[in-house]
Image (cartoon, rainbow, N blue to C red):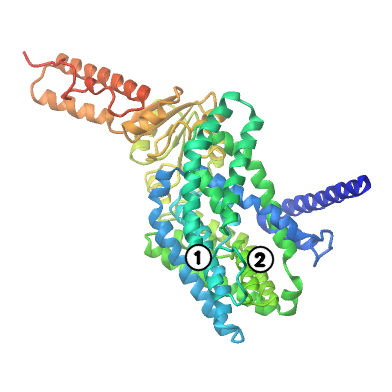
Amino acid sequence: MEETSHHLVADVMLGGVVLLGAALLAVLIFRRLGLGAVLGYLVAGIAIGPDGLALIDAPETILAYSEIGIILLLFLVGLELSPSRLWLLRRDILLFGPLQVILCGLGMFAVIHFAMPSFSWQAALVLGLPLALSSTAQVLPLLQSRGRMKTDYGEKSFSILLFQDISIVPLLTIVAALSRAPAEEGAIEGWSLVLYAVLAIAGLVLAGRYLLSPLLRLVGKISERELFIVTGLFTVCVSAAVMQAIGVSPALGAFVAGVMLAESPYRHELEADIDPFRSILLGLFFLAVGMLLDVDVILSQPFFVAGLALALITVKIAVIYALGRCFGLQDRPSIIMAMLLSQGGEFAFVLFAAAQQALLIEPEAASLFGAVVTLSMATTPFLMIFAGKLAARKVSGDVQLDDPELASQANVIIVGHGRFGQQVSQIMQAAGRSVTLIDINPQTIDLSEDFGFKVFYGDGTRVDLLKRAGGEDAQAIFFCIDDRYMTAESLMPVRETFPRTKLFVRAYGREQALLLMKDNGIDIMREVFESSIRMSADALKYFGTDREKIQDIILEFRHRDRSRMKAQFTTGDMHAGTRHSFGGDDSDDFLITDD
């Protein structure tokens, strides 16, 4: 027994050495070539898999465990999306997403039906619809690493990917409805599956509010880092397991868990603790996909497989580009989004396996289309090189979208060069401060360049981008962007990374200012506060009010406003402190009138 245990440990260690060594070598080479890590993982998997050097003989087991990486990825994405922001994306999730899946799926159904007439229409349908799905594991890390998540096409891409994960339920229902195999006893099918999924999501939301939040507060009081890691992984595993138990994508459960914690004060702690697990497991996932690639299928009919992969990419680019234009995206962002989502996705393997079990397709067909999906994934890095060049081309004029790492070291970093940031920039430069300007809107960058201002491209709320811009040596960072959902918690990573740098933040209004007040180290300015005071003072001057009385009124107003803000912040009630307002039902009697 002990000898068997030693052999098992030795096999696991040897397998780990092979997997990690192959990944390390391949990723280093492909990164050096500028082709990205994903292609490196895929090639490494092919090299060490059964159809390569055969150094690993159980890729299915590795794939099963590494799919936890996708689950963790969706959990981390959920942490970035508060329910309010998710509500803003509802049109793209509930309209853009379904149209993309339906149109791309029917397009590939038509291609398969005419290219492979020996297949039944049922087989063509259960093969075509899964090909409409894109690779969440490939696209989301790409958007995050390049700071594109908050762009128009980044948000729409995310909305599509989120709906695709949700669409696993109806797609599995379609496979079950067409199934020729006898139904498994006790299996949940059809509309019952949809109902169970809705009930499960509702249950997870309630559990998050009434069980998870108190648990995190308790863990926070104990202040043990290991407990945060255990709590985070436990939350992900429970949420995923609930969905898995009813036959729904476990990644969807993890996403719901992330959204539940998006407004938690412990969000950043969880994110920092779980992200390393996500990175390693996603790498293993792509290694396993490469190992499972049936090279014999490609070698036996290379032109046919390549043609199907090309047809998949072409259909998806054409459909997604057209939808992007219909949903208000400009020409270039639509093309970039279409290329970004043009590959097949990891959930296609799940649906192909379900279709095979339902006796709708043969194992050879599942292998063939699995190879098509893998080949399409391998093209994504090349397409994104082209898309990156396209994104960096001029929008109008000769604007170049340069990374902030090209900027000279400056005293001040200003994030957002719109109507607010322009004024701050002018005053800082008038005071002799050197300034680095950052904006994520190419049109703003183009317009600024027309007036002689160099603005660098990127999401200035990302810590990695601020590091490249010289944030560690800057005296101040001004957040002048119109982001109504920026809070003290969302800026905590910036505060922790640059503790010696002063943060100045533009707030949309009183409610956002109260959220930012949780951090005493942030200087807040409500965007219309001072201008409204100035307009009122000018009006009083026009009415003939004495200058000294105007000053008294303004000072009293500022004092009362601060008192009211303090009351609202302390109680968490927007109705608190109304007695400090002029003209309220229970306001103080103080009043300055003309003598």
Q: Residue furthest toward the left?
A: 595
Left or right placement of residue 450 versus residue 178 in this view = left
Identify the secondary structure beneath mark 2: helix
Residue located at (75% from left, 71% from top): 295
Q: Marks 1 and 2: in contact by CB < 8 Å?
A: no
* Residue in the foreground of this view, choosing between 506 and 113: 113
Give the quarter of the figure containing the C terminus: top left
Crowd tier of the residue under label 1, counting other residues whose Cα lies within 10 Å: few below 14, some 14–19, many 20 or above: some
Image position, residue 492 (x, y; %): 51, 31
Instruction: Look at label 2 and name its amino acid.
Output: Thr
Q: Which quarter of the figure has residue 480?
A: top left
Image position, residue 470 (x, y; %): 55, 33
Q: Where residue 374 is drawn, which disc sits there?
A: 2
Image position, residue 171 (x, y; %): 53, 67
Q: Mark 1 points at which residue?
A: 170
Q: Residue furthest toward the front?
A: 185
Q: State the separation of the CA atoms marked 2 and 1.
A: 24 Å
Image position, residue 478 (x, y; %): 43, 32
Residue located at (54% from left, 40% from top): 465
Work out whether mark 2 precedes mark 1 in sequence or the reverse, and give the earlier one.
1
> Is any part of residue 330 visible from this angle?
no
Residue located at (65% from left, 51% from top): 68
> Is any part of residue 532 visible from this angle?
yes
Q: Where residue 247 is drawn, which disc sits there?
A: none
The total number of labels drawn is 2
Residue located at (58% from left, 65% from top): 343
Identify the secondary structure beneath mark 1: helix
Q: Which quarter of the figure has residue 433?
A: top left
**Is residue 105 shown above or below 444?**
below
Instruction: Look at label 1 and name its amino acid.
Output: Pro
